[in-house]
Structure formats: structure tokens, C-alpha cells
Amino acid sequence: MAILNNDNIAKHDFSDISGAIMPFNVLADNYGAALAGEQLRLEHESYTMGEERFKKALERQIERGEFTDNATAKPLMDTVVPAIAEAINVFLETKQRGRPHVAKKYLSMLSPEAASFIAVKTCLMMIAKYDSCELQQLARKIAQNIEDEVRFGRIREEEAAHFKARVKEPLNKRNGLIYKRAYMEAVESGMMAKGELESTHEAWPADEQFHVGVRMIEMIIEASGLLVIERKFAGIPDKDHQAVHIAEAFVSKLTERAHALAGIAPMFQPMVVPPKPWTGITGGGYWAKGRKPLKFIRAGSKRALMRYNDVDMPQVYHAVNIIQNTAWKINQDVLAVVNAVVNWDNCPVEDVPSKNKADKPVCSEEEATDPIMLKKWKKKAAAIYRKEKARQSRRLSLEFALEQANKFSQYDSIWFPYNLDWRGRVYAVPMFNPQGNDMTKGLLTFAEGMELGAEGAYWLAVHGSNCAGVDKVSLDDRVKWVADNEAMIIASAENPLDCTWWAEQDSPFCFLAFCYEWAAYVKGGRSEKFVSHLALAFDGTCSGLQHFSAMLRDEIGGSAVNLLPADRPQDVYGIVANGVNVILNDHLLNGTDDEMEVLTDKKTGEVTERLKLGTRTLAMQWLEFGVGRGVTKRSVMTLAYGSKEYGFADQVLEDTVQPAIDSGKGDMFTAPSQACRYMAKLIWEVVGNTVVAAVEAMEWLQKSATLVSSEVKDKKTKEVLKPAMPVHWTTPAGFPVWSEYREQEQKRIDCVIFGEMRLQMTINLRDGIKIDAKKQASGIAPNFVHSMDASHLKLTVVKCHDVYGIRSFAMIHDSFGCHAGVAHLMFKGVRETMVETYETHDVIAEFYEEFAEQLHESQLEKMPAMPAKGNLDLREILKSLYTFS
């Protein structure tokens, strides 16, 4: 019988909150039994992997009358999951000669239905996010998720069995919440004392785990046809791989029934009560017991996490708890518009992926027989296919976010738990969160309102202008822009489906949210008493370069990224673009000519000729296309995070040249790869002259990391005088960072899928003992500067909360958000903490001090001098209007 036949599914009664005794009591005391039960139901739904989770989701939606939210998911799951489960069942029961397949041992540890559901869910989640997925990567993820179900499902089942056998009947006999609570507390204490909640699990070897994933992919294809495997980048060594796609028939169904994916994809969801405060390295955020607890730090291993167990970092815990205590709600006005326009055939928001599938290009008989015309057709077809794949992926992501927004729109307040990555950056845990894209941010607003006060309307107007993309002018000019366009702003709020001017702006959905807020403010008589819920944001200017410029007192780079006062904001991306254009115009007149290159194939000896474009031709092509800040932005932005000239070329191709070619606006690029490499070289040259100190600091960090991570041996005896060490530093906020890349212990996997397609890959079995000095060096610059912007964010949150009394925060790395009524205080606080950070901490010197003693005396002379400091007066940051604006 089909496991998804709801008439035959045993109901799990959430009203008694099985297995979650203590958190239910705590939450019920503070927020009431209804919300306590609701929160624990949501957590159960988020954590449970497999068919059990899906059954609970169906139960909950039927009980609330929200079954339509999942109606689109049911047809797919009803057909695909049972078919694959049956294939697993046959696989497990079929006897074979010789050694049994390694997957049998592990798949027999859980029900075929659960394994099937986990595998399908994993496929949809990964492929929806990335359009396609490498076969090896998908196989490993499927197996990892199945192992997690085996491991953590045992805890769930253990609790459920205990509850049903010993607790349920006595609990039902007790009347009144107070008596039920007292009884459950006694039960919990008894279970803990007897060790009845303990469970063990032996980790699956990585190579065997991989074989489980491969076999699951085989069975998914055999039983359902859900997946398609195709080879990509054949013959290109660094890119050649087998890619897995969702079969076209299912993509169509998923697009039409997008809630199906949304119902099974999320691992974590928003909360309907405030998150559990973090007091240690595990157990904060969500409330339920008996699950895999959240980690405070997203460390790569248990060993790495345990380093923080005894670390005293009160400001770090305080900052994260403040951020996650912010109450949010769904913006109902924006939600209504989003629900409508995303399903229009011609959505006014350019960035919204269409619900309609692109028409397949048809090759005419004439094109098929003419080599030149066929080549052009293939180029055109490839562009359409690329756009269609991207559309599918982005559409599924959109539908997921929208499903979550509709789902949580019934609540007056929702919360998002946060934790840190190993560099200290703060991240929301749920996939749908305030750190998302424009649509997601537009759908969310603060649950608690605040009066604008004397200055709030000014900052609200600045925010509106920023959302419109009018952010390269002065603050007063931004306010004036809102005043000049007030009629259109109000018209957009009053009739957004007819007056779609709002959709033409830079961040359309955030701008629409502003339109509603501003229109209400005007309608309310422009009163200082107007209660605003909107989250305003102050964004840094190329944050990584700001931090390097501040720590090195670099007045040149600092001026380019707005650390110094100016009448209008400086645009470092525009500055670099202008520098590039100067070189382009020079090359147009004085550049090199085209020439034919003779290329010899090393293997075959075949000699071919290729046209190498000269700088005069390349400059002409780029000048025809036009080089503005959009061409240079990503490269400049990622410079501080370790991107080099080679990486710039890939970024220019991905962001500029390929989209231009696909849209028909890039026909001037006759040799795209050459054009990208040329542009990358120019950007690298100009940006290096614009932010010299940052480049020098990154080179110093890389050399330092190389020495720390290198082993020193006695030349004669070969005795290890100094082992290779991880790079360690502590941020100004008190967060210790361990940059520890180790060479992996590996095993070569060689297997055959479907008996004919050979699949080879190297499995990383575990971290080795030896430090990987190369990775240490390449990763140090981005990791160091990320840790500094993360430190600044946490210190800003603490100061704004403790000193200025701000209570609601919208924080995204280098974006600092709050209510309009306290924006003037955030405006001060974010600058003050940057100045205080680099006045009281010489972070480069402190970094050196933390590892200098680890160096062998023979390495000291190799240690480069610390980067020289410039003459930037940090106090000028306090006067700069545009450091964060």
C-alpha cells in the first residue's frame, strides 16, 4: 500500500508534544501552549528526513485546512517515491552471486520508503539550486542524507516508542496544563537518569557511502526516469564531468506544481517564537530536544568545533542572540503583489524568471545542410538552452521562497535563528531568511513598529532612493528624488498591478515595500508619530577594501571606498572603470595588431593556426560594448577576498560577455575568451594602482601563512624542527579563527554505473595530518578580511543595542539595518565601531604576534616586513556620510 495514502498513515498527535518535554514547558510558560506546540511541530517537520516528515506535513496541513499548500507536491511523490521504494525493496531481496553490493548493508538499515524519499528530496534540492549537479557530488549528498536519517532517526524512534509505551496513557489522565507539565518533567528526569535517550552510531566509510549514493541514482533512473545523466565539457580536463539533470517531463511538472519542491526542500524553517539563546557551541536556535543540535559555529569537523568549547567570547554570543531576537513578519501588501505578478506571462520585474518554458529552437533544413548556418544555429540554440536551464533553477528557488512566505504569513511574528561560519560571519539558519534576495527581503518587515521621530522620515526617504538605485548621489539629493517622484510612489502603492513603475527600479520588491510605507506616511499627515515597520539598510562600500584601507591607514584606497568625507559618494567600481577606459582609448590608437599564432598539438603533432587579436582590436570591441561600473564591479569587489587576474577573466565572461552574447548584444566579441582575459588584465592593473595597500597586505598575509604552514627540518638529520601549523588569529570582537586546511587522506573510487558508464573519482576519506600550505596561503586573505567585517558587524550590533537601545536588526555582512526611527543612531554606531576597532587594534601586528612564536628562527629572516601604514585619519570616518549609506 502506498505510504503516502493519507487514509492509511498512522497519525502522530502533536498536541502532546512527544519527546520534547522540557522545551514545551519552557515555551508554554513564556508564549502559551498553542505557540509552544506550533513551534515544536515546525521543528519536527524541519528535522525529520524521509517519509515520516512528509506524513507529518500532510497531517498538519489537513488539520489546519491548508492542504492546498501541498496539493501540488502529492502527485509527484505519490508516483515517484513508491516506485523507487519498490526498486530498493527488490534490490535488497535479490540474491546475487559473489560479494553482495556494499549498498545493501546500509540501505537495509531504514525503510525503502524513507530511503526513496530522502534520495528524491536531495536530488530536487540540489539540482533546483544549481540547475545541474555533478554525479559524484549528488551521489555523496544522497548517501550522507540517508546516513543522517539512520543516525538521527534512531533517536526520534527511541523517543516515540518510549512515549507511546510509558507516557501517553498516564499523561492523558491528567487534566490541566500545570499537572501535565509536572508529570512530563518527572518523566524526562527519569529517562535522563536511566540513560534511555542515549544512542550510538558508527560512521559509514566515505568510499562505501559513495557507492550507496551511486546505487540510489541508478535506481531512481531505472524506476522513475526522474533523472538524466549527460556529459558536460567533454575533453576539457578541469571541467569534464557527468552532470545530473531533472528529466524534462518532471521539470515541467515541478514548474507548474512548484509547491511540491517547496514542501520537501527546506531543511530549516523560520520560528514562531524567539530562538533559544546561544550559551555554548551547540543547542541554541531551535528548542526541541532529541534532534541533531545546531552548531554555533559551522566548523568542518567536531574537533574544530570543540576548540571553541572553553573559549570566553561573551560579545560574540551576545551579538548573535541580539540579532536572532529580532521579530519579523511577512509584508502582506508586498506578498499579494508577488503572488500575482510572478505568474503573469509578462512579469514587469525583469529579474523574475518566467513561469513559461522557453520554446525550443527549430533547425530548418537549410540550416542543417549549410555548415556556416548550422554553426550559427548551434550558437543561438546553446544560448537559449543556457537561459532555459537558468530560468528553471531560478524559478524553483522563487517558488520555494514564495511558498515559505505564504506559509508564515498567518503569524504576527516570526524569528530566524542565526549562527556563524568558522570565520565568524553571521548567517541565518533557515533557507528563507532576511539575508535573501530582493524579493525575499521585500516580503519581510519588522514585526514591531517604531515611530519615525524627528529624523526618521529623512532616512526612510534615503532608503527608498537607495532601493531605486539612486545611491551614487548625496543623501540630500536622494531625499529630493523621493520628493520629486512622490506621485509615482503613491500611485505604485495604491495600484501596483496597474502602475508598475516600481518594478523598473533597481531593487523592485524592496522599493515596493518602501512605496507602501511612504504612501502610508503621507496619508497619515507626515507625522513624526507615524509607526514604521520597514527595515532600512546602510551598506558599506566594497567592505573588504574598506577594512584593508582602515587597518593600513591607506588614504588613497580609503578615499575610493568612502572612508573620507566627500560631497557625494565615491564609486570605486566607477573609478576603476574610468581607469580602464583611459587604457582602452590609448590601446585603440597605440595598441598591437592582430597576428596569426601557430599552435602545435603536443600529443598528435598537428599544427594549426589561430588568430590572436591585438590590443587595438580588443580595445575597439570593448569600447563599442561600453565599459561601465557593471563590468568592473565583481572583480573589484572580490579582490579583497583573494580573486586574482585569472579569476577576473572568469567573472567577466560569466557576468558580462556570455550574457551579452546570449542576448545578441555581444556580437562584437569575436573571440570571447581573449576579450575576457584582456579585460581582466586591465582591471587588475587599474585596481592594483587604486588600492595599493590592500594588495600589499594580501601578499604579506599569504607569505606569512606559507611560513606558518611550512615544516622546517634539519638539513642533515632531517629532524623536524618546526611542524606545519594552522594559522590562527583572534578578531577584535574576541572570536578565535583557525584557518586549518589539511591535505586529505584519499581513496580512488572506480565503479561502473548501469554496467557501461565508468565513474572514477577520488574520495576524501578524512582530514590528514599534514597541513596543506598551498591552500593555507590562497585562503588567508579572504578569510582574514571576512573575519574582520564579521567582527565589525558583531561589535556594531552590541553597541547599537547596549548603548543606543536599538532592538531590531537586519544584518547581512556589510549591510546594517534597523527601523527608520533609530537610523540616525545606527548611522553613528556603525562608524564608531569601525573607528574604535582600528584605533584600539593593530590587527596586522596582532595577527603576527599570534603566530610569530610558532616560527623557527630560520624562518624569521624570510618573514616579510609588515605592510607600511599610510596617513589616513580614522576619525575622518566619523565625518564621512558615505562610508555606510
Image (cartoon, helix red, strand yellow):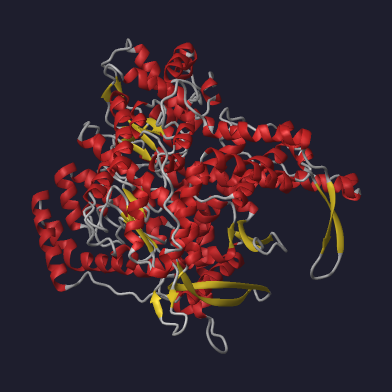
Q: Residue at x 30, y 42 (%)?
A: 837
Residue 142 visible in rendering? no
Quarter in which the C terminus is drawn:
top left
Residue situated in front as seen by the camera: 707 or 624? 707
Instruction: Measuring from the top left, give residue 203's x and y in whole percent.
Output: 39, 74
Residue 704 visible in rendering? yes
* 428 lies above or below 93: above
* 608 lies above or below 90: above
Q: Residue at x 12, y 65 (%)?
A: 189
* 420 lies above or below 591: below
Instruction: Measuring from the top left, give residue 254's x and y in whole percent.
Output: 56, 48
Q: Is residue 447 left or right of residue 392?
A: left
Q: How many marks?
A: 0
Q: Residue at x 43, y 58 (%)?
A: 5
Residue situated in front as seen by the camera: 100 or 393? 393
Residue at the top extreme, as displayed: 525
